[in-house]
Image (tube, rainbow, N blue to C red):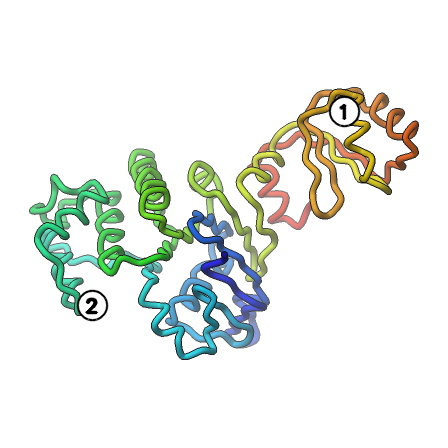
Amino acid sequence: MYLIETNELTKRYGDVNVVDHVNMHIPEGSIYGFVGENGSGKTTIMRLLTGLAEPTSGTYSLFGVSNKNKEIYKKRANVSAIVETVSLVPSMTAIDNIIYQEKYLGIKLTKKQREELLMKVHLEKNEGKKVRNFSLGMRQRLGIALALINNPKILLLDEPMNGLDPEGIAELRELLIELSSKEGLTILISSHILSELEKIANVYGFISHGKLLEEISAEDLQNKGRKSIVIRVNDSSKIEDVFIKMKIKDYKIYPNGDIQIFDLIPISKLVLALDKSKIEVISLNSIDESVEDYYLNLMKGGN
């Protein structure tokens, strides 16, 4: 089930489509890595999903409910977001910031619930410390604690790793993995740097100049960065029989007809075996690029 889905979602400012007919599909329980350069439309999409902006055209749905439906307001109660900046009061302690957010939301937590909230983000030892004395990473984690007050099912995070040092990035990654695996939270997290999300995302959406270029699973993305041969044939129905005879075990057949082979085999031997089985090779390419290379090539309009 997709907890977030968009259909030709478009946002225009003046003559520019900042979000250009975007179709996103975010599965329940996933960590969706939303990757694109600064100004690519990531923040605008998050503003649309949270109701901070209205689409020019197209629609989106939360938990299967369209934004055209009045029920969308109830569904948004299960969504929390940190868009652009974390709103904290520096002169207050961590606990006081939580209490302040409770009053804003009209929610009343017990002392134990507040402590459990800080434990979730690993700030239990800093509950009485003024936020002005927090590191940037600690502030980000406290911001997430505030976003969890209403027990959301979806969490939207806009560039949360910006400015963090390596230790802060690692701590945030660990926290998000915990929230996804233990709490069942569906997380949409954006970044303009792919490597920041590689260790946590299990689905990716690549966006550039308002257009969604590709959605891809983490497994398929990693496969793009392995040495392999990609072939397309006129009839793939018998190709697995050929692979069995050649003892080819590590391969993947994609819906578009591409067949990616990761086993190291002589290309001439493969072509000959296919020819003997009356399978015509339409195209054959060798892939030897990193995941980062693949992403950069995609952004430049390559294949």
Which amino acid lies under the numbered mark 2 shown in the image of this protein?
Answer: Leu
Quadrant where the C terminus lies?
top right
Mark sitting on residue 105:
2
Please rate how many residues cluster around mark 1, counting C-alpha atoms within 10 Å: few if below 14, some from 14 to 19, many from 20.
few
When asked about the image quadrant of residue 54, the answer is: bottom left
Residue 299 in the image: state x and y as whole percent. Answer: 60, 49
Q: What element carries label 1?
A: helix
Q: Mark 1 points at which residue?
A: 244
Which amino acid lies under the numbered mark 1 shown in the image of this protein?
Answer: Ile
Q: Nearer the viewer, residue 235 or 271?
A: 235
Residue at point 86%, 40% (across, down): 282
Q: How many labels does the image show?
A: 2
Residue 44 in the image: state x and y as whole percent. Answer: 45, 65
In the rendered image, the vertical position of residue 113 relative to residue 261, given as above or below:
below
Q: Is residue 20 left or right of residue 189?
A: right
Residue at point 57%, 35% (across, down): 222
Please rate how many residues cluster around mark 2, counting C-alpha atoms within 10 Å: few if below 14, some from 14 to 19, many from 20.
few
Residue at point 76%, 44% (across, down): 257
Residue 37 in the image: state x and y as whole percent. Answer: 50, 52
Residue 135 in the image: state x and y as whole percent. Answer: 21, 42
Q: Nearer the viewer, residue 43 or 221?
A: 221
When asked about the image quadrant of residue 279, the answer is: top right
In the rendered image, the vertical position of residue 171 relative to residue 16, given as above or below:
above
Mark sitting on residue 161:
none
Q: Which of 225 and 218 is in front in this view?
A: 218
Mark in the foreground, 1 or 2: 1
Residue at point 19%, 49% (across, down): 117
Q: Is residue 103 left or right of residue 52?
A: left
Q: For the residues marked 1 and 2, what is the alpha-carbon distance in whole angstroms?
A: 61 Å
First of labels 1, 2 by sequence position: 2
Q: Nearer the viewer, residue 212 or 270?
A: 270
